[in-house]
Image (cartoon, rainbow, N blue to C red):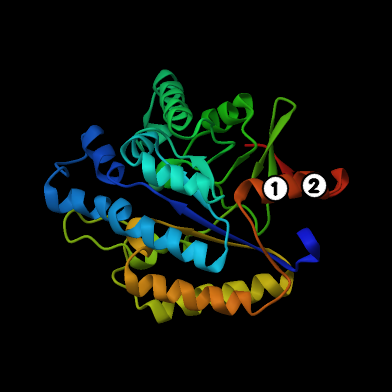
Amino acid sequence: MQWKNDADCAVLLTFDFDGETMWESRVQQGLGDFDTPPIQSMGEYGGAAGMPRILDFLDEYDIPAGFFVPGKTVERYPDLIRRVDDEGHELGAHGYSHINPVAMSDEDELEEFRKANEAFEDVVGDVPVGFRSPAADMGKRTLDRLIDMGMEYDSTLMGSDVPYFIEAEGKEIVEIPWFWSQDDAPHFNFNMYPLVSYQSGLSSPADVRSIWQTEFDACYEEGLLFHLVMHPQIIGRPHRMKMLEDLVQHIKGHSDVWFARPKDITRYWRENVPENERDVRTV
Ligand SMILES: [Zn+2]
């Protein structure tokens, strides 16, 4: 695939800025007593330390990125959200309270979208054009709703190495895929209490860099989309950011790479993939 400016590879850095909703949503769903200060402070780290470090890093390397943020986190950190917007990054929808849509009624889901949009509107005067589901899960109802709402893209599914289209009732949405191996959470997420099901411990950054760099090299050779999914409360720790910086220096050593925001990739894909070559799917 030839990307914008004849680039051989598109590079997308996305960050899910969950903050305290990571644990609040579990309390809200009756999954346990996770509102104790030590547990909550793991979410607080994302806003207090991770986000400023990530934004400084993106500024230093002149990289535009995408941030998917629950409405509650938008309300809690308006200055950080304005900074994300002011510095040219994209804000994406990520629910209001970070509850899995599959666990919600139709009416509750609609209310989540309404409250999240209100939060974005209040803080940056605009609403997102893309969505990533909290908890990496959703049903057909949510996809149909995104299409119905006129969202330009979703970034929750994992069905390809490049964007594709999901169609429902004659309308379509672009899907920007990702995969767990390029997500920081399975590699680095660690909690003594409560245990989370997908944690593999405190991986060495060198091991993770090896996976991510090999993936980038392969995406570059094949002309694909290299997409990292990260969380400020996880990747934002100093030793992990050092690894990300080393990886970005490796990527920047290649001249024909396009660093883009999710909506840039969506619009490029929609405008440049010929109708008869589109990968269109239904769910
Ligand atoms: Zn999330």
Image x and y of residue 231, in percent:
39, 56
Q: Quadrant of the N terminus?
A: bottom right
**Left/right of residue 36 with respect to residue 239 in the rendered view:** left
**Nearest the eye: 169 or 49:** 49
Q: Are dots 2 and 1 in contact, CB under 8 Å?
A: yes
- Residue 1 visible in the current orientation: no
Q: Residue at x 56, y 26 (%)?
A: 145
Q: Would the CB of label 1 be found within 8 Å of ligand 1?
A: no
The residue pinned by badge 2 equals 278
The residue pinned by badge 1 equals 164
- Residue 8 visible in the current orientation: yes
- Does 213 sit above or below residue 125? below
Disc 1, SS: strand
Instruction: Rate crowding at label 2 as few (under 14), some (14 to 19) or many (20 or more) other CA atoms within 10 Å.
Output: some
Q: Quadrant of residue 147?
A: top right
Disc 2, SS: loop
Image x and y of residue 270, in percent:
76, 44
Q: Quadrant of residue 204?
A: bottom left
Q: Residue at x 54, y 68 (%)?
A: 61
- Does 55 sit above or below residue 25? below
Q: Residue at x 75, y 69 (%)?
A: 8
Image x and y of residue 239, in percent:
34, 75
Q: Amino acid at mark 1?
A: Tyr
Q: Amino acid at mark 2?
A: Arg
